Image (cartoon, grey):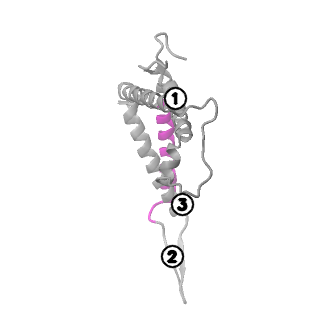
Amino acid sequence: MPDNKGNLFLFEAIELRDEYDRQIKIIENLLGIRDSERSGMRFYSDNDIEGKEPVEGFCPKDFTEKLKKMQSKRIKLNHAIQMANFETEIDYNGEKISIAEALEVRKNLLANNKTVAGRVVDSAYKRITHKEERDIVHEPKHSFSKSYENFQDNLKELRGLINQIHMANHQSVVKFKDE
């Protein structure tokens, strides 16, 4: 629901961009653009007897124009979203950062959490090598308790950051009107 000036909230703009992406994809499929990208150049031999002809109601020329307009609108919308992401600030650990920075922090937290999760699994078990007369026990490099606690702390930090971004997305306005 646009604000009183007709601008979209950030979460609405993101959804609209996804809608534009879906529309662009279907038009590209209709025009055969996606097929030619996947398979390279299409070559038809003289033996090919099957052809394609547009049905009534589908005019490739009209859809080519529609595709250009949709791509242009998507570029403008994406630019407006990026501007809003840089202009809107959230509080993260007592510091004001833009949504754009918060998205980078989120990406880093997700990558870090994946690393820490691996450390948790690795630290959960001792490795035992059975030799002829004795067993060799390899202790984990990291403490399981500390690794698991670190994992839990990362999840809480990530959840808090995502909640801040989500709230900002519902309060920030993007300077774009869907026409």
Residue located beneath label 2 in the image: 137
Q: Earlier in the sequence, mark 3 or mark 1?
A: 1
Q: Which residue is mark 1?
A: 62
| Mark 2 crowdedness (10 Å alpha carbons): few <14, some 14-19, many ≥20 | few
Q: Nearer the viewer, mark 2 or mark 3?
A: 3
The amino acid type of the residue labelled 2 equals Val
Image quarter (top left, top right, bottom left or bottom right) of the N terminus: top right
Q: Which residues are magenta?
A: 141-165
Q: Residue 123 placed where, x, y %?
A: 51, 62
How much space separates mark 1 and mark 2, taking CA atoms? 72 Å
Q: Residue at x 58, y 58 (%)?
A: 47
Q: Is residue 95 visible?
A: no
Marks 2/3 in contact by CB < 8 Å: the verdict is no
Please tell me how crowded label 1 is: few (under 14), some (14-19), or many (20+) other residues with Cα within 10 Å.
few
Predominant SS of the magenta segment: helix
Instruction: Give the camera-side residue of 152 and 26.
Output: 26
Q: Secondary structure at mark 2?
A: strand
Contact between marks 3 and 1 (CB within 8 A): the answer is no
Q: Position of residue 112 (x, y in %)?
A: 44, 50
Q: Amino acid at mark 3?
A: Val
User: Of the residues tagged 3 and 1, which is closer to the observer?
Assistant: 1
| Mark number, residue 121 | 3
- How many numbered discs, if any? 3
Q: Is residue 152 above or below residue 135?
A: above
Is residue 136 a member of the stretch shown in magenta?
no
In whole angstroms, how far apart are the C-alphas of marks 3 and 1?
56 Å
Residue 129 in the image, given as x and y percentages of width and height = 53, 79
Front residue (pair 33, 9): 33
Foreground pick, 137 / 179: 179
Disc ID at residue 83: none
